């Protein structure tokens, strides 16, 4: 018997912007908040403006170009064409950069992070969230033969695959990368204080409207919780850093009494069975933090913690289940929270 729950690929980091609970603080009225919809999700940005300008159209334009490069749901995107083996595609900087970032994390995580896992995701039913089921071992073994980022290269600005069945999904780090792209635009245009959030992945620069570091909430991992019932576990001060999260408590199904998460291990083809419920990563770039959060969920608590703890300029906040059914928290040295 299968039970289906809410689907969210990315563990939601609540966009707080200005923390209204702080009182008696002078508010800089030059800050502007804008929001929109892209990549199948929402985005929110708060920034210190020059002349109270609204930058919603500029951000929408940036994200449309990004979408035309890396969206698997866009029929004319470069990613879609490459997945369909269109060998005429000349890849743009977005595709080159995310493939380079992915290969770095692929090697760093002992292949726990791998965007060529897309056919496995489809086999389990997670790509379209229909017909969720456990594939046969024969099917998994067959697909694993053409999973592996080492089977892909770029030659003369074209993607070369060793097997035409290879396809990509950058769901695990594309939203983080889009955050970086928007933040880079703000920086290039002279903005010094902003917080960008797309699909729950965030990056900040400078200070908020009350002159303090931006504050971003980490959600408590509760199975099946609705959007209106979310509970904030803790709040993280963020300035000049990215915060991205991943978890296994939203996008999963239960079959024959066993819970299967969408966090598939590219080495085995199966979800990782581990006590780790969610992880939040703070790093310099959102593309790295986003991808690393996914890699950690695949690696599990012990290996994931060891990896994050070994990396410079990177911190982690891990929420895991205990044997008594409750959960506990462990974080790397230097991870800051505001209670």
Image (tube, rainbow, N blue to C red):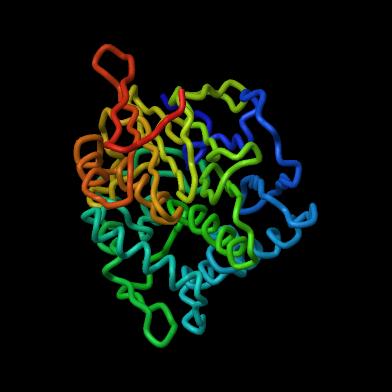
Please say if 57 is above or below 31.
below
- Residue located 27% across and 45% down the image: 308
Q: Position of residue 76 (x, y in %)?
A: 62, 69
From the viewer's side, name the closer residue of 80 and 155: 155
User: Number of labelled discs?
Assistant: 0
- Residue located 70% across and 59% down the image: 60
Please say if 32 is above or below 90.
above
From the viewer's side, name the closer residue of 158 and 118: 158
Q: Is residue 289 left or right of residue 44?
A: left
Q: Is residue 190 left or right of residue 121?
A: right
Q: Is residue 300 left or right of residue 79?
A: left
Please say if 56 is above or below 335.
below
From the viewer's side, name the closer residue of 248 and 48: 48
Q: Position of residue 323 (x, y in %)?
A: 24, 16
Quadrant placement of the N terminus: top left
Tell which residue pokes out farthest to the bottom in this image. 156
Q: Position of residue 239 (x, y in %)?
A: 49, 46
Q: Position of residue 302 (x, y in %)?
A: 20, 36
In the rendered image, which quarter is residue 54 located in?
bottom right
- Residue located 48% across and 51% down the image: 240
In the rendered image, which quarter is residue 191 located in?
bottom right
- Residue located 51% across and 49% down the image: 203
């Amino acid at each position: 018997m299968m039970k289906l729950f809410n689907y969210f690929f990315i563990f939601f980091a609540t966009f707080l912007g200005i923390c209204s609970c702080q009182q008696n603080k002078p508010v800089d009225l030059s800050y502007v908040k804008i929001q929109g919809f892209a990549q199948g999700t929402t985005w929110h940005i708060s920034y210190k403006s020059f002349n109270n300008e609204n930058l919603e159209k500029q951000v929408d334009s940036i994200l449309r170009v990004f979408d035309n490069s890396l969206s698997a749901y866009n029929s004319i995107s470069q990613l879609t064409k490459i997945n369909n083996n269109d060998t005429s595609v000349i890849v743009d900087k977005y595709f080159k950069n995310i493939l380079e970032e992915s290969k770095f994390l692929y090697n760093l995580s002992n292949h726990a992070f791998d965007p060529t896992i897309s056919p496995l995701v489809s086999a389990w039913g997670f790509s379209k969230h229909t017909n969720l089921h456990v594939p046969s071992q024969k099917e998994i073994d067959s697909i694993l033969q053409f999973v592996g980022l080492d089977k892909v290269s770029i030659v003369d600005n074209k993607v070369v695959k060793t097997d035409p069945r290879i396809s990509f999904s950058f769901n695990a780090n594309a939203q983080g990368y889009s955050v970086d792209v928007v933040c880079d635009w703000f920086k290039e245009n002279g903005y010094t204080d902003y917080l960008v959030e797309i699909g729950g992945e965030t990056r900040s620069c400078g200070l908020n409207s009350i002159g303090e570091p931006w504050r971003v909430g980490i959600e408590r991992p509760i199975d099946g919780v609705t959007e209106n019932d979310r509970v904030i576990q803790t709040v993280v001060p963020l300035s000049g850093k990215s915060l991205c999260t991943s978890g296994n408590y939203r996008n999963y199904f239960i079959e024959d009494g066993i819970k299967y998460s969408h966090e598939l291990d590219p080495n085995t083809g199966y979800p990782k069975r581990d006590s780790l419920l969610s992880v939040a990563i703070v790093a310099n770039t959102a593309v790295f933090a986003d991808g690393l959060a996914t890699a950690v969920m695949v690696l599990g608590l012990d290996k994931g913690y060891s990896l994050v703890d070994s990396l410079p300029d990177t911190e982690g906040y891990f929420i895991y289940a205990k044997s008594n059914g409750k959960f506990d928290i462990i974080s790397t040295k230097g991870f800051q929270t505001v209670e």
